[in-house]
Every structure is written in structure tokens, then in C-alpha cells.
Image (cartoon, rainbow, N blue to C red):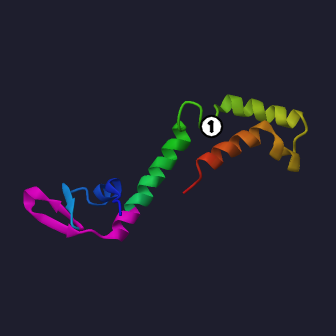
Amino acid sequence: MSLDWEAIFTAYPECTCVANGKAFKHEEDITSTLDQTKIDAARVELDKVKYKTERVNGIGSTSGYPGWEEQMDMLYHDIADGKLGVAATTGSWFVGITSVKNAIPKT
């Protein structure tokens, strides 16, 4: 079983070591038994931050949403080409945005 170190140290920011299912703070000799519910909650929050960062910044140099100017141009051309209603789902704007949404799903 691998441990989710990032979530553990987020859930227990005061700890400096984890061993045998306990979080330790060496300077004060304080120990806490790890609570998986607390670790899972920390993972949820970390994933929310990751999701937001990926949505805002993209994930790599070619991923993420195109600039708003390009999105508006794609939308204009989709409307000009008569791609409204069901046909709109085949337009460049819809297809482009859908690919980003599929690559970075909401958590």
C-alpha cells in the first residue's frame, strides 16, 4: 500500500515524520494516529486546487483552453456556418471546449 504523502502532510501540517500509522512531531514528541478520513478530505482539497490550476493555466504547452479571442472567433464562424442546435455540437468551438473538458474533468 502506497501512502499519499502530500495529503498526509496537508492533513497533518505539524508533523515532521510518519511511521507505523502515526504522525510525529519530533521537537515536542507529539504523536497522532493517522485518520484516513482526514487524509481523504485533504486529498479532495488538493485535487480541487489542482483542477483549478489546470483549468486556469492549462496542462502543458498545447493543452488548456484557447484564449478568449480565439474562442469568440470559433463561435462566430460556427454561427456563420449555421451550426446551431444539434449541429452546434460539431462546430470548432464546441469540439475544442469539449476536448478540454474531457481532458480535465471536474472532480
x, y percentage for residue 26?
A: 11, 57
Image quarter where the C terminus lies is bottom right
Q: Quadrant of residue 30?
A: bottom left
Residue 51 placed where, x, y %? 51, 49
Direction from residue 74 to residue 85 in the image, left or right: right
Query: Which one is in front, 46 or 19?
Result: 19
Of all residues, the one furthest to the right in this rendering is 82
Q: Can residue 15 be spotted in the picture?
A: no
Residue range in magenta is 21-41
Looking at the image, which residue sits at the far front?
A: 1
Image quadrant for the N terminus?
Answer: bottom left
- The residue under the point 59% across, 31% down is 62
Left or right of residue 76: residue 60: left
- Asked whether residue 23 is drawn in magenta, I would say yes
Residue 103: give x, y in percent of width and height: 61, 46
Q: In the image, what residue occupies the spot 58% across and 54% down?
A: 106
For the residue labelled by badge 1, is the local secondary structure a helix, a strand or a loop? Answer: loop
> Mark 1 sits on what residue?
65
Residue type at tag 1: Tyr
